[in-house]
Amino acid sequence: MNIVLIAIDSLRADHLRCYGYDRDTSPNLDALARQGALLSGMYAPAIPTQPSFTTIYTGQYSLTHGIISHGGDETLRRDSPFLPEHLQRAGMVTCAVDNMYSMRPWFARGYEFYIDPSHRAKMRLSVTCEGINRRAIPWLRAHARAPFFLFVHYWDTHTPYQPPARLRHRYYQGDPTRPEFNTLEPMRTAPLGDVWSKQWLAPLSGKLWHGREVRDADYVVALYDACIRYIDEAVGALLSALEDAGAAAETLVIVTADHGEMMYRHGIFFDHHGLYNASIRVPFIVRWPGRVAAEQRLDGMFQLVDPAPTLLEAAGVSVPPTMEGRSLMPALTGHDAAELARESIVSQECTWQAKWCLMRSRRKVIVAREPDLYGRPMRELYDLTTDPDELRNLAQELPAEADELQSALEQWIARMLEKNHLDRDPLTTHGATLGKRWAEGKY
């Protein structure tokens, strides 16, 4: 068998048509979902990029693998399980078309081939999906007959959203510089707002709008959606190459993301921090002809600790006992998904803010370990059934429910600290990395 793992950085699940979005952003991904299984509730246990991808690779929560922040000083232990290493030992040819090795060296572990097309880009994260495919597709064709594991990482949905000109106005037809628009005004004083305004929106305004200032945040959302459509085309091209190479029937394909993306809710502009579902809910689409039945939608809550054991089981490789995720293969191959779904999920961030959250039965509590940069309450409670955008904090109205969920969260953290021989919650001792730099004027 072969495995193709596609990660689309910063991709919100709810901006894909197959997840209910009203724009036609994802025809190829929608088709892929119809050919296999779509998991409706996949969540990142840690955000953003570095802790989340470390979780995807290790099948461990951040308190176990130790990478709790983006931009911190943590290093992954050499004895941590790592998906590509286990697949390589089992005889697979392993390849990543990616650039995370430039951030942290452990992201290259287990890869016989590590191809980084971003060296040709002005910024590492501005490498386009076409640039990625120019390296991934020839490699795929050359190794189609060998059992292989191919990891492909697309970046276009990461800020700054820069779709090609032919897609730039696909989802926005008006003039975003009209004076009555003011939805971008609060961004000026938000974290990263000045950076985005000067380095991204100001040049965009000058180039496309004759120097008139872009003022409508929905225009930026439309650029994000156009980037999804651009990546969707690249996914289609990659899958076509897999088919043309005669390897599609033997290949397990998974498409997911490391985290989602906030648009402009809660004062967070076009970034991926905050433990709201826009940031932590990600797509998860699986196709494996002959093994995973088509037209499946698996509901329930799952987490990104699960892909690594899932792929190992699919490849017939023993799952290390130190992995904390659950293989989803039973659910994907016909067993009741409810047996594997979690009653609750936990997630954390220690980058722009230091917070934990726990979600259970459509209720969600968010608990801060230190004040954040937005002046948000130290505790938030949301009813996701009536308030899916998490705009109405019920913590003061329903203190008993908030207490119950926070108690469950603290018990989970305490068990993980004990398991990993940690004296204190590292979010408390570490502090938010980028948030701290921003507050000190060093970002």
Image: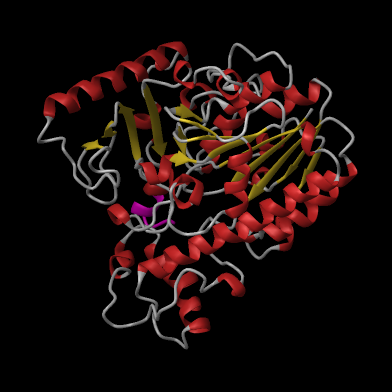
Is residue 240 rendered to the left or right of residue 104? right
Q: Which of the 4 image quarters holds residue 310?
A: top right
Picture quarter with the N terminus: top right
Q: How many marks?
A: 0
Extreme-left residue of the structure: 397
Residue drawn at 29 percent across, 76 percent down: 181
Where residue 16 sits in the image (x, y, percent)?
50, 50
Front residue of 190/424: it is 190
Where residue 237 sits in the image (x, y, percent)?
73, 54
Residue drawn at 66 percent across, 34 percent down: 106
Is residue 144 rendered to the left or right of residue 111? right
Front residue of 414/213: it is 213
Q: Which of the 4 image quarters holds residue 192?
A: bottom left
439 part of magenta stretch: yes
79 part of magenta stretch: no
Whether residue 351 can be seen here: no
Where residue 78 sits in the image (x, y, percent)?
66, 23
Whether residue 381 can be seen here: yes
What segment carries the magenta color?
437-443
Residue drawn at 40 percent across, 38 percent down: 350
Picture quarter with the C terminus: bottom left
Is residue 101 positioned above or below 327 on the image? below
Where residue 397 sits in the image (x, y, percent)?
9, 35
Q: How is the image coloured?
A: secondary structure
Residue drawn at 26 percent across, 37 percent down: 385
Is residue 213 rendered to the left or right of residue 245? left
